[in-house]
Image (cartoon, rainbow, N blue to C red):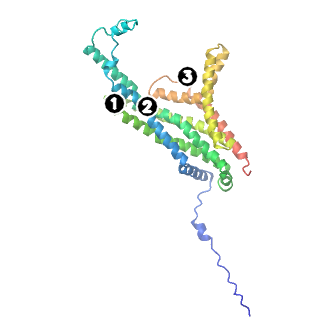
Amino acid sequence: MNTTPPFVPEAQTSTQGYISTIIMGRQDFLSVLFRSISGELYKIWRRRLSKVLLTIGLLIMMLGFVAVALPPIIVYNSPSSIFLPPSCSSLSQAGGTVAPGSCLDHPPTQQDLAKAEQMKQEAVRSSAASLYLPGSFITAGQIVNFIGLLLLVILAGTIVGGEYSVGTIRLLLTRGPTRTQFFLAKLGAILVSIGITFLILMPIGIAMGALFELAIPGIAVNFSFFTGTWMLHAALYLLESILGLLMYTMIALCFSFLGRATAAGVAGAIVWWVLENILSTILSLLAATNKGVFADILKAIPDYFIGTNISALLGNQTSYLIGGQPSSISDLHAVLVLAVYLVIFIGSAWIVHLRRDVTN
């Protein structure tokens, strides 16, 4: 007697229902690239490091405006008598030379006190100019340019070098977008991060300046500067600041790809920045101690450094925004030099990334 149970074929699970619930999205180049950038930004936001860096940036922005606000607040709360000329008798007792009109040979009169009060108000107004617009715009921009360079270089080195350190680079290149899309997604995420940094820190800095301004009554803010031309130059200042931070983050991106490590990108960008400042000082000193064509060559070399051209772009816009002397380097010269650096750093990193074997 056969006791073997009859064979019943298993019901084949239909995959049609699962496939219909999967949203693949458009597979053209730009659609995949934009989704990859969104994925990179999501990873940046989910990392604790990005939140720590943003918190550090906020704290430094606040502390920067505290440092700017202290001098005018101290002067405002000081007695106006400190602006009176010294007493002639005290100068003669100290053995100093007394110039006519440089000291008081009589007790302070109401006219002397009024003049001292006027000098105090002028000192307060000049020292507090960085707390309200348009000065606070430049103050906030300078703080973002300084601290953003350090923080965003760390971020740029991390999002590239981290893929190599944990080995996810192999999975991303075999299961994800093409190598070019992967590279452009990293670059796009860094550019968006720079823009977000300015959108967050700049308004906070300007608001901090306005709050500290309230602690110094009597300063009349004139908004006559707020014209269409001023807004255009303010937008150019922001774009050039973003370009400046992009330059150093691209150095970090390049060295991270070349060295396949976060430390290589961060150290490479910071060392580049430090060496440029040191070399600019040394070359300026050597040019001052020499003459002729050799001195002209030494003086011209720093004009092709990254930091010099970024400072020239920002200085030219600052002269429009709050006044001052523009840079001797033209905007066209600075943009062309920076464009060459961008092509070198981005191009070399891209070529290495395309040709690198990541299977080992």
Callout in the foreground (1, 2): 2
Drawn side of residue 151 relative to residue 95, left or right: right
Q: Earlier in the sequence, mark 3 or mark 2?
A: 2
> Which residue has dot 2 on it?
67
**Residue at (67, 15) in percent of width and height:** 293
Residue tagged 3 = 328
- In this rendering, which labeled residue sits more in front, label 3 or label 1? 1
Q: Quadrant of residue 289?
A: top right
Sequence-first tag of 3 and 1: 1
Q: Is residue 147 above or below residue 14?
A: above
Label 2 SS: helix
In percent of width and height, residue 315 lies at 51, 27
Q: Are marks 3 and 1 in contact (CB under 8 Å)?
A: no
Of 251 and 320, the residue lying toward us: 251
Residue located beneath label 1 in the image: 216
What's the residue type where badge 3 is placed?
Ser
Q: Give the Cα distance between marks 1 and 2.
A: 15 Å
Left or right: 227 with respect to 156? Answer: left
Q: Earlier in the sequence, mark 1 or mark 2?
A: 2
* Contact between labelled residues 2 and 1, with CB atoms less than 8 Å apart: no
